[in-house]
Image: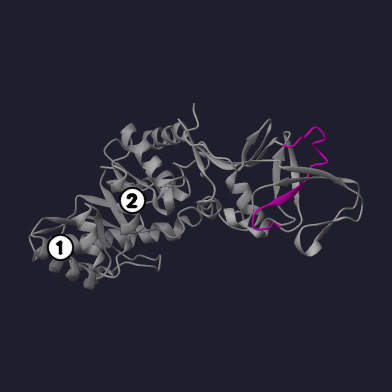
Amino acid sequence: MAITRRFFRPTWAEVHLGALRENLRRFRRRMPRATKLLFVVKGDAYGHGAPRCARAAQQSGLADWLGVSSVEEGVVLREAGIRLPILVLGSLYPFESFLAAVEFGLTPTVASLDSARRLVEVARRRGRRVRCHLKIETGMGRIGMSPAAAVEAARTLAEERLVAVEGVYTHFSCADSDSKFTAEQLRRYKQALADLARAGCVAPLRHAANSAAALRLPAARLDLVRPGLAVYGLYPGFVPVLSLKSKVVFLKTVPPGAAIGYGATFRARRRTRVATVPLGYADGFSRRYSNRGEALLGGRRCPIIGNISMDMLMLDATAAPGARVGDEVVIIGKQGREAITAAQAAAVVDTIPYEVTTALTGRVPRAYLL
């Protein structure tokens, strides 16, 4: 394995592309052979780096589609040489962005009757065949059409032979926590599919399932599944892909009563060894971890003490007496026999793993392990 990017400030995120490919394989093995896989790489691949993760998926042959949230995200992938079909999962607005989507070979989502009409305009203007997916609202309460509106949109699109409805999909709101409501959403979705079929719209790709739904609800697998969390190893049974690391840049020992950090929110109760680490909220490591989180140093769990600042945090390194300047600090990942997962880090500040990894800013270089 080789790190493929150099950096100087000793704070970085390691992204293990081999683990990502293994997760794709594991996910594939649990799906029906005929079910296609759309790998969700929105949010810069959940903070892992969309171009590199998309390329790894493309080269492996384990993904049939990619999913992004916006035209801009899709354009980044096209400019990076990604050739897989790309579905823009977000609602396109302003509607002129349909034109950009078509120009870059992206497949747009039609989530309203107005957007269906705009896509027809784009197809006529370009004089070329355009494909789209219809989004059905079944209980997420975000974007999507009612079944009746979807039928009307499908009829509008059918009038223009240059527009083809390639897929019809919905999105579950709590597939990982409420199986009853998820089943009800699936029922509503299938009813909408039946309504569309009666209107003459039968799309080759029906899809609804994210990682949790695909793994927990076989009836939701249909023609295509849309894993994200599992492929990044942020779901039980899969290998974590990202580790967040830094190094000790300063060490000191302070007496009882010494104040640490902005606001003097921490005062040492005993003689304390303090390690300074160049990671702060400008890197996307939330200030909410102040006096709450932990990191691994010398194979030991060391508490974060004091308020996290823009560029640095401090650890109580007393439990790691052998630590020296330059020693590795693991914020997310493994060190020795200890490990801190993204889910564990998320629980400390009452959030979800998605937020922990997507929050990492561009100031944190991603080092890709092959």
Which one is closest to the eye, mark 2 or mark 1? Answer: 2
Residue denoted by label 1: 198
Q: Position of residue 27 (x, y in %)?
A: 40, 37
For this view, does 349 lie left or right of residue 22? Answer: right
State whether residue 245 is above or below residue 353. Answer: above
User: Dividing the picture into quarters, in which one does residue 61 lie?
Assistant: top left
Identify which amino acid the numbered label 2 is placed on. Answer: Val
The x, y position of residue 53, in whole percent, is: 40, 41
In this orientation, does residue 278 appear?
yes
Q: Say above or below: 300 vs 44.
A: above
The span picked out in magenta is 308-325
- Identify residue type, mark 1: Arg
Residue 173 lies, in percent from the top left, at 44, 60
Viewer-closest of 325 and 65? 325
Disc 1 residue crowd, few under 14, some 14–19, many 20+, Cα 10 Å: few
Figure check: 318 above or below 121: above
Marks 2 and 1: CB-CB under 8 Å?
no
Question: At 79% from the left edge and 36% from the top edge, which residue is drawn?
Answer: 320
**Camera-nearest residue between 223 and 231:** 231
At 33% from the left and 35% from the top, the residue drawn is 62
Residue at image coords 72%, 33%: 299
